[in-house]
Image (spheres, rainbow, N blue to C red):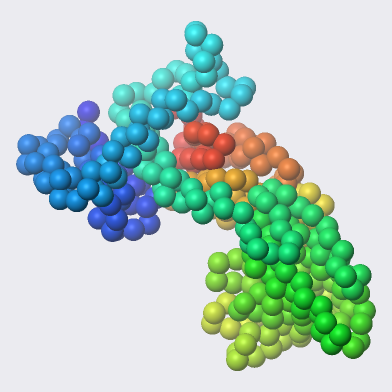
Amino acid sequence: MRVTGHFIEKRRFLMGEKSGSSARDAATEWFVRLRDDAVSDADRAAFEAWRDADPAHADAYAEMERLWNGLDQIKRRPGHPTGADGTQSMEATPAPSGRRRALRRMAVAASVAIAASLGAQTLTPTGIFADHRTGAGEQRKITLEDGSTAHLNTATALSAEFTANSRRITLHAGEAYFEVAKDAGRPFVVDAEIGRIEALGTAFSVRRTEGAVEVIVTESRITVSAPGRGAAVLAAGQGIRVTDAGLGTVTNVDPKMALAWRRGRLVFDNRPLGEVLAELARYRRGRIVTLDSAVEALPVTGSFAVADTDATLETIERTLPVHLYRLSDLLILVDAGPAP
C-alpha cells in the first residue's frame, strides 16, 4: 500500500505550518514518510541523519511513536460497539480497507500530535487571575457591587474595579452580557483591549475573540470605541465588530438569535460547518479538527442545546456527509463522507 499525497496535504492543512518548522512537525513528516511503500534506503538514511543530529529530534520522534502506539488504547465513547472481549473499539465495523485505515490512522497520529502540542493551552484555566471566570461549557450570573449583573458565557474571565467616580470591567477572555444599574455619576466601562464600551444604564453583550471584539446592544444606547481609531454609538438591536484595523460597520442584529446562549441554546441559520464547529469547540474541552477543508463550507441550520455538544455533533454526523472519529473526550476528527 502506498500512502499518497492525499494524506500529506491533510497533514499540512492540520499543522498549518511548513514542514520542518519544528522538531515535532518534522517528526510527524518523517513518521508518515517512513510508512510509505515507496520509502527508499536513501530516505531511511536521511531520517537517521536527521534523528541523530539533535537529541530534540530523537525525542520528538519517540513521542510520535508513543502517540501512535497509544491510539490502540483509546476507547470509543459509551454506546459504541464493543468487541468479543467486551472492550470498546476505536473503529466502527465493518472494518475499512487497509488503505483507508492507514490513511485515517496517519491523520489521527498527526492530529494527536497537534493536540499534544496545544494540550497545556487547552487545559489551562481561562484568566486564572481574574476576579470571576467560567470553564469550558460553564455559565454563571454574578452580581457586581453596584447592583449590575454580568452573565458569563463559556470560558470567560473578567475583573471588576469600582471607585467613587468610575465602574470599570476588564474582559480578559470570552463573552459576557451586562445589565447595568443606572448611576449617572459613574459611567460603566468594559475594556476588552482593542475595544472599549461605555454605558450608563443599559444592557449589552461583549465577546472577545482572537483579534476581535464583538458588541451587541439589547437595551438603550452605548458608545463603542477603538483607542485612537474612532467611536460609534449603538442603539438596541445593533451590533459592531472591532479589530486591530479599527471599528467595523454598525449593523442590525437579532439579539434573540445572537444571544441564544443565554437561554442555553446555540442557533445557526445557514452557517458554514467550519464556523459551527468552532462555536461548538468553545463549549467543550479539547479540540475539534477537520481533516478535509471542503466539509467546512457545508451549511448548517438548527437550534441546539449548549449543555450537550455531543448530541449536536451526532446530529451533524447524521444529517451531513461527514464522519466523526471520537478519539477521546479531548479530540474529535471530522472527515468527509459517511462512516467507512
Residue in the image at 71% along x and 54% along y? 134
Tell me where residue 328 appears, x and y as whole percent: 53, 34
Tell me where residue 139 appears, x and y as whole percent: 76, 52
Q: Is residue 162 visible?
A: yes
Asked if 172 appears above or below 121 in the picture, the reply is below
Residue in the image at 72% along x and 46% along y? 306
Residue extending farthest left: 42
Residue 181 is left or right of residue 308, and the answer is right
Q: Nearer the viewer, residue 92 or 109?
A: 109
Asked if 206 appears above or below 151 in the picture, the reply is below
Asked if 59 appears above or below 318 in the picture, the reply is below
Q: Quadrant of the N terminus?
A: top left
Residue in the image at 80% along x and 71% along y? 204
Tell me where residue 35 appears, x and y as whole percent: 22, 34
Residue 126 is left or right of residue 199, and the answer is left
Asked if 223 appears above or below 50 in the picture, the reply is below
Q: Nearer the viewer, residue 110 or 315?
A: 110
